[in-house]
Image (cartoon, rainbow, N blue to C red):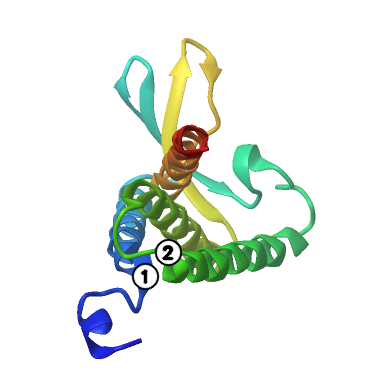
Amino acid sequence: MNEAQLKAGQGAGALRWLWLSVVIVAADQVTKWLVTQNLALYERIELLPVLGLTHLHNTGAAFSFLADAGGWQRWFFIAIAVLVTVLVCFWLSRMPARGQGWLAAALALVVGGAVGNVIDRVAHGYVIDFISVHWERSFFPAFNVADSAITVGAAILIIDSFYESRRKQKVI
């Protein structure tokens, strides 16, 4: 790699998108701190007829999967998140610096969300959830900013893969 390529940002590939991961981690940790400082565990504040804040602790994964597994799942989920983060950062480093913005942004959202939840698992042994969506007495599992980033990132990855496959079909 020559000096001109490094100056153009091509040496790091799409790693420049990790600024988005940093924003997600910061927003996630600040909102979790605000919740823990202002709401007791299980305390609830209704914001809208379908949206509230509820301070909860989740020792499991999405939808409290393996929450009652006895403690080993903490390290399992940390290991998975760290592995995914490393692999995605490697993927970003190999991508071109320009031309695949949606894919890079999606991957950066996933990294930010994974790191945000890993921080909780390492520091507390659980993830702090607080966004509560419901319809009357039916509640969707609570989530947080990190979970939202992972979900949005995954959705963008799926959408981008459809567009990518259509682009490849047009070339063939």
* Residue 163 position (above or below residue 51): below
- Quarter placement of the N terminus: bottom left
Residue at 31 percent across and 62 percent down: it is: 17
Residue at 76 percent across and 63 percent down: it is: 72
Q: Residue 14, percent across and down?
A: 35, 65
Secondary element at image label 1: helix
* Residue 69 position (above or below residue 55): below
Name the side, left or right, on which 8 lies relative to 129: left
Asked whether residue 92 appears in the rendered view, the answer is yes
Q: Earlier in the sequence, mark 1 or mark 2?
A: 1
* Residue 40 position (above or below residue 54): below
The quarter holding residue 124 reads: bottom right
Front residue (pair 19, 170): 170
Q: Amino acid at mark 2?
A: Met
Residue at 31 percent across and 74 percent down: it is: 10
Q: How far, Cα to Cα, is label 1 from label 2?
A: 5 Å
Q: Residue 90, percent across and down?
A: 51, 71
Q: Amino acid at mark 1?
A: Gly
Residue at 36 percent across and 45 percent down: it is: 39
Secondary element at image label 2: loop
Q: Are discs 1 and 2 less than 8 Å apart at CB?
A: yes
Residue 95 badge: 2
Front residue (pair 50, 10): 10
Q: Alpha-carbon neighbours of circle 2 within 10 Å: few (<14), some, or many (≥20)? A: some
Q: Alpha-carbon neighbours of circle 1 within 10 Å: few (<14), some, or many (≥20)? A: many
Q: Residue 133, percent across and down?
A: 44, 25
Q: Which residue is mark 1?
A: 13
